[in-house]
Amino acid sequence: MKRKGQGIRFQLTAGIVLMTIAGIGLVGLMSIKIAERSALQWKLSQAEGIAGFMRASMRLSDGGQGWGGKLAASLADEAGIADFRLTAPDGRQLASSGSMPSGPGKLVYSGSVEAYMYGGSFLTGIGEFMRVSANVPGAGRFEFILSLAEVNEDMAAVRKLLAFYAIIDSIVIIGFGVYFLSRSIVQPLKKLEESAKRIAGGKLYDRADVAVDNEVGSLASSFNSMAERLEDEIKSLERVNLELTTAQDELLRNSTLAAVGRLAAGIAHEIGNPLGALNGYIDILSRGGLDPAEEKEIIGRAARESDRIDSIVRDFLEVARPAKKALFPVDVNSLLRETLEGLSVRADFGGVATDLAFGQGIPHVMAEEGKLRQVFSNIFINAAQAMEGMEKKTITVSTAAESRPAAVKSGRRRGDAPAERLPAPREFVLVSIKDTGAGVQADDSSKIFDPFFTTKEVGKGTGLGLFVSQSIIKAYGGEITFRGADPGSEFTIALPAAEGGA
Ligand SMILES: Nc1ncnc2c1ncn2[C@@H]1O[C@H](COP(=O)(O)OP(=O)(O)OP(=O)(O)O)[C@@H](O)[C@H]1O
Ligand SMILES: [Mg+2]
């Protein structure tokens, strides 16, 4: 699966960049604030110096009223102060120059003088100027304005310098950070990822070549031991799989051989009996001395034995290589009725009642009529024989048409494929033949379609009837199934309906 979004390299780099910028930015801001503070401190001490000088001079002048204004003006002149004001304790203005700001300003210092700041904030730095107010004994209050333009110029230079160092520092820190993270985390993880992909692609022998001494390194070594185990497990699974396939092939070959063996033994046995009898009759005939009537009798018996051999061989040939004869539409209901009528004269059908429940409008099926008659006959005869000696003897025959999914042979079920991809359902004709006989022993129900499986006495059954019937029905694309009924048995034959309906 392709991963979306940024890789770990991008995320780590972004993290380093953000952290560096935040760190360097904070340190820079702190440095600027410290520089502003010390610049302000310098200006304050300047202001204190001026105020102190004013006080000392006033004291020397011994509080002469006229002195104050002159002193203030000349001091302001010396200190380069354009704006000042000297106010007597009674509120009279003794001297002034320039103008005083209208607002009170922000008190930033209160000691031997009071300093008020105008303009400036946390973000924009210190203000534009400062109003200093000092008590002067003998004169009153001396106020003057100190410009901060010089300080602001210095601060701008400091900011530029700090910004320059911040950029250089950031580049160095980010460069080193990215390099170390890449070496210790990103590259090892990349190698791990590539190795995992190669293993997933089938290169089970692949290992991650990661030699870093950290968690990623131990992850890589755990990954490698996992890959080692995976490789071992898969190899052993492949080995087991191979062994199983070989064993299965062997088993299949053996069971096929066994089945062929059983079949051959069955055929040999079935043919052996009439063949033995035939040999006996030939022997009797070759010795001679029989009167014509006896001779005729022996020849008749020999002919019957040879017919038996012929019929067994024919049955088998039919199953092994069904003759490709033309198929015709057959009306199942009529054929069932005719077959039953034909059989009713047989001794084993004495006392057998039939209950016919034929469906209406049943479609024809494509078959060779003779073969289908053979199938029905065999099932009817089996039913009659199973009811021999019983009080109630009923054969119930019912027919119906049913729509079934066409894919019956692959064992596919309805849910396996979307409905639109299933072949169209086919019409089937169902024939159910139920008897009230002794039923099939539970152990035998899986064997009744096997060749030569019979529970009947020698001479009465060869055990080929159902085997041959099944091969006929299968050749027509149908199926024949058995289930126990209570009482008796039920055989169901399903045959595909002829195209185009009845
Ligand atoms: N309707 C039935 N009721 C009880 N058992 C049955 C019935 N049909 C078949 N069987 C059992 O299945 C066995 C096999 O039947 P199948 O028709 O293949 O051979 P068979 O009747 O024994 O001999 P054949 O049909 O070759 O003369 C029977 O011997 C019998 O045990
Ligand atoms: Mg039979």
Image (cartoon, helix red, strand yellow):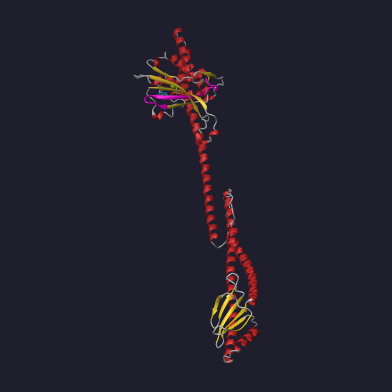
Position in image of residue 285 (x %, y %)? 47, 12
Nearer the observer, 428 or 4: 4
Q: Is residue 162 above or below residue 276?
A: below
Can residue 270 be seen in this snapshot? Answer: yes
Tally of marks:
0
Nearer the observer, 8 or 367: 8
Outermost left residue: 391
Quarter of the rendered image showing ligand 2: top left
Position in image of residue 5 (x %, y %)? 59, 53
Report the side of 167 relative to 91 (left or right): right
Which residues are drawn in magenta?
Answer: 483-502
Report the side of 416 relative to 390 (left or right): right
Nearer the observer, 405 or 320: 405
Residue 491 inside the magenta-drawn segment: yes
Residue 34: image quadrant is bottom right
Report the side of 314 relative to 152 (left or right): left
Q: Is residue 415 above or below residue 271?
A: below
Residue drawn at point x = 61 percent, y = 65 percent? 174
Residue drawn at point x = 65 percent, y = 85 percent? 78
Report the side of 222 relative to 435 (left or right): right
Nearer the observer, 94 or 85: 94
Position in image of residue 434 (x %, y %)? 41, 22
Q: Is residue 452 above or below residue 95?
A: above
Position in image of residue 398 (x %, y %)? 43, 21
